[in-house]
Amino acid sequence: MFDFCTNPDTLGDFQWMLCYLTTGKHMGLYISFGTVLLLLAITAPTALLFGFGGAVAARSRFFVISVFGRGYISVVRGVPDIAFFLFFVIALDQGLEFIRHKIKCPDWTDAIWQGNDFVVCQAAKLPLGTSPQWIHEVYGFALAVLTFAIVFGAFAANVLYGAMTAVPKAQIETAAAYGMSRRQTFWRIIVPQMWVYALPGLGNLWMVLIKATPLLFLLGIEDIVYWARELGGTKTSRFTDYPHGDWRMWYFLMLLVFYLGFTKLSELVLDRVMARLTFGQATAGGEAQRKANA
Amino acid sequence: MKKLILGTTILALSAGFAIAGGHSVVRMGTEGAYPPYNYIDDKGEVAGFERELGDELCARAELTCEWVTNDWDSIIPNLVSGNYDTIIAGMSITDERKEKIDFTTNYTQPDPSAYLAMSEGVDVANGVIAAQASTIQASYIAQSGATLIEFATPEETIAAVRNGEADAVLADRAYLEPIAAEGGDLVMLEQNVLIGGGVGMGIRKSDTELRDKFTAAIESMKADGTLNALIAKHGIGEPF
């Protein structure tokens, strides 16, 4: 990075540290922070969408859709995350490849499952074996987003389902008295008012999601915990210009600060959102706000 | 013409070779945490004995290769499900692993494993010994009278000895040597343990064509002495 880094042995402590913290390997760490934040930024809205869909499905008057929605909520909530991450992702990946294989290579005569091996033709590979490493990484990332969204979507669906039911009955009856259809009642009365009931639960989910990101490494994505472990490990002088002892504690301390800081920031934002949503609501919070302003 | 190509393809397939088709890019899976075999260098790239060896093998077999890292724990399942095409991660050839995957011919001699401990007088036969999970060393300790504690990464096995959780760690001598040379407080015990059948590249059972290509490349490196030169350069163990 810097010109004076060519011979780290001769450097003073400060410059050594500066060179050490700007090695290509540390760049991997810094980039992985971005990966984690990007994952959160994409996963949270996607999970919310899944949750909304699940809650609407569970409330449906059609028996089949309702069973599907309630089934999704209960099954996914019941399966341990780690099992879901190990099993579901591989199953999804192989399922996609299986379908592509059937379409693209109809002449294939060999078995797809040969003992332990899962063999599809090269054209059906996802991503293609010829694609550069970054496509493999993007694909892995997309699988991660989808898996996170399905898992957290189930929890969000449960929260939203509860929130929809928590909207006071009188509001819905009034809407009916005004002649609104079910659809109109849903979009104009229930949805705008449910968020205030949903937010505490959704806020919790967000906090859990932040801490669940190290599961990324199970999917082969190099996240911050992987880099902290790799960079913190003892380095002998034969394999690096910057030998050091077991520094994992410092790296994990940095992660602790990052996660705590991020949690604190989230709390501040959630508080503001809550204050905003409470405004004008017929809840205890809304009433308190009205009195304070009056 | 199209029919002809199709016809030959089907013929080739039914004849049983080229099962996985031609590999245009071969993805090399490694752990990246086991110097000198493989590790991540300061630039953040895979380096070490197996990096140099793998690049040379790919050049000889006229393959385009790409390096990916994967956790040791899931390195075999990810090979089998097709996330990469080879394992080149200091993996010793054992009968147990052969049930799941194929190996090329070995590119190192059976490497002596050694104990690293805080002091010379450790009772390795009955003490608490650390090893990386799913390694030949771990199964060796499990069969001996000693108590085994397993860790996911090599790094943690060393840390366990330093903080007193284990009396000693059993690992490949080549991995422990630089640590003993640097560590100061850690000493390598004299006694060597000979386990395993040498290190080879792991390849899917269905991928016989790729296995044969790499085996041929390894044999050619053995024949012209370049493999021995690499082994000596990285301090991997005995030459062929």
Image (cartoon, coloured by chain):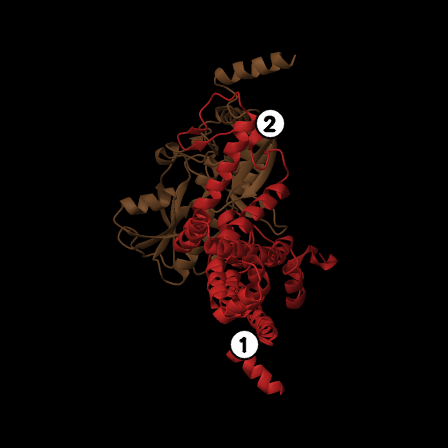
Chain colours: A red, B brown
Residue B152 locus on image (x, y percent): 42, 51
Which of the 4 image quarters holds residue B137?
A: top left
Name the quarter where the C terminus of chain A is drawn. Answer: bottom right
How many residues crowd around disc 1 within 10 Å: few (fewer than 14), some, or many (20 or more)? Answer: few
Disc 2 or disc 1, which is closer to the eye? 1
Asked whether the residues under marks 2 and 1 belong to the same chain, the reply is no
Which chain is home to disc 1?
A: A
Q: Which mark is residue B114?
A: none
The image's mark for residue A282 is 1
Label annotation for residue B60: 2
Which residue is at 41% across, 61% downward?
A: B162
> Above or below — where is A280 with respect to B81?
below
| Camera-side residue of A214 and A7 | A214
Q: Is residue B195 visible?
A: yes
Residue A210, horizontal then vertical, whole percent: 53, 62
A250 to B186, vertically: above or below: below
Of residue B175 and residue B18, the one placed in the foreground of this image is: B18
Please determine whether, in this image, residue A138 is positioned above or below residue A96.
Answer: below
Q: Nearer the viewer, residue A82 or A154?
A: A154
The chain under label 2 reads: B
SS type, badge 2: helix
Q: Disc 1 on helix, strand or loop? A: loop
Residue type highlighted by circle 2: Arg
* Residue A199 in view of the camera: no
Q: CA distance from mark 2 to mark 1?
A: 76 Å
Query: Left or right of B127: which side holds A55?
Result: right
Give residue B24's quadrant in the image: top right
Where residue A275 appears, as percent x and y from the top left, is 59, 76
Amino acid at circle 1:
Ala
